[in-house]
């Protein structure tokens, strides 16, 4: 499970106590809400389904897949379906490739989602073995599903924009700059990531 509201508040208060910029932004924008996802392969499959489509379209495809594969949506069930069956559920050829990559790794026991490496970078490397799961998707899974407290998706556009606004920079920082800017927020960069998404959408910042 991801970071709870109580954990977010505690972690953000800790960072704000030593960083006046964060304290000011927190006062203006308020605390973010928790973003919790279940651990396991279904969450990663849902990530693949949701790539580059609207929330409504993703929900429609997911519901069709659930009707076809059963509520558990077991990996071996998806692997047993042919192209046309999955296409009828709304999965493009590319997404079928991604979904099969995930399901094969899970079904073969090559990807053990209940025992990913404790080191964040090693866990990201494991997850990005799945076709269609890049660094950002892996980071989001580790943050929202596993609640890893120091995940920092520096490549995320909203994270970069919010950091630039908080620090009153002339332009949006690059991924490299955003990573460097957050060094002082260790080991609570996960809470700060969730806060930056919240701040990005806030008219107060």
Image: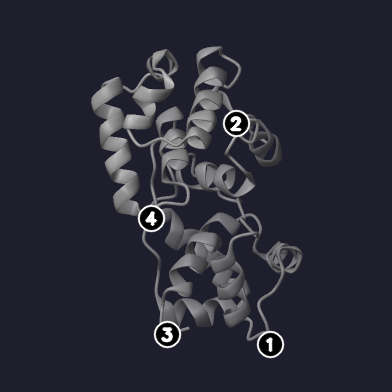
Q: Residues within 10 Å of mark 4 (few under 14, many from 20)?
A: some
Image location (x, y in percent) of residue 96: 48, 30
Mark 1 → mark 3, Cα distance in angstroms? 18 Å
Q: Secondary structure at mark 3?
A: loop
- From the viewer's perspective, tell me whether residue 119 is left or right of residue 9: right
Image location (x, y in percent) of residue 32: 40, 65
Question: Of the residues tagged 4 and 2, which is closer to the observer?
Answer: 2
- From the viewer's perspective, tell me whether residue 164 is left or right of residue 66: right
* Residue bearing mark 2: 130
**Considering depth in this image, is 81 or 75 the residue closer to the camera?**
81
Of the numbered discs in the image, which one, if any, rests on residue 34? 4
- From the viewer's perspective, tell me whether residue 17 is left or right of residue 10: right
Mark 3 → mark 4, Cα distance in angstroms? 20 Å
Q: Secondary structure at mark 4?
A: loop
Of the numbered discs in the image, which one, if any, rests on residue 204? 3
Residue 162's place in the image compared with 204, above or below, is above
* Residue bearing mark 1: 170
Mark 1 → mark 4, Cα distance in angstroms? 30 Å
């Amino acid at each position: 499970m991801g970071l709870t509201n109580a954990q977010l508040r505690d972690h953000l208060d800790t960072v704000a106590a030593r960083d006046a910029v964060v304290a000011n932004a927190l006062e203006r924008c308020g605390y973010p809400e928790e973003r919790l996802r279940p651990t396991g392969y279904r969450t990663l499959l849902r990530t693949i389904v949701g790539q580059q489509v609207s929330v409504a379209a993703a929900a429609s495809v997911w519901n069709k897949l659930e009707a076809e594969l059963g509520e558990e949506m077991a990996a071996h069930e998806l692997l047993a379906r042919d192209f046309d069956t999955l296409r009828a559920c709304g999965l493009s050829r590319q997404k079928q490739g991604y979904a099969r990559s995930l399901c094969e790794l899970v079904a073969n026991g090559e990807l053990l989602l209940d025992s990913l490496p404790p080191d964040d970078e090693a866990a990201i490397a494991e997850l990005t073995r799945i076709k269609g799961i890049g660094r950002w998707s892996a980071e989001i899974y580790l943050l929202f599903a596993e609640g890893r407290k120091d995940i920092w998706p520096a490549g995320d556009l909203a994270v970069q924009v919010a950091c630039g606004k908080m620090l009153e920079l002339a332009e949006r920082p690059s991924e490299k700059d955003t990573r460097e800017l957050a060094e002082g927020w260790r080991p609570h960069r996960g809470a700060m990531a969730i806060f930056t998404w919240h701040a990005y959408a806030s008219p107060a910042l």
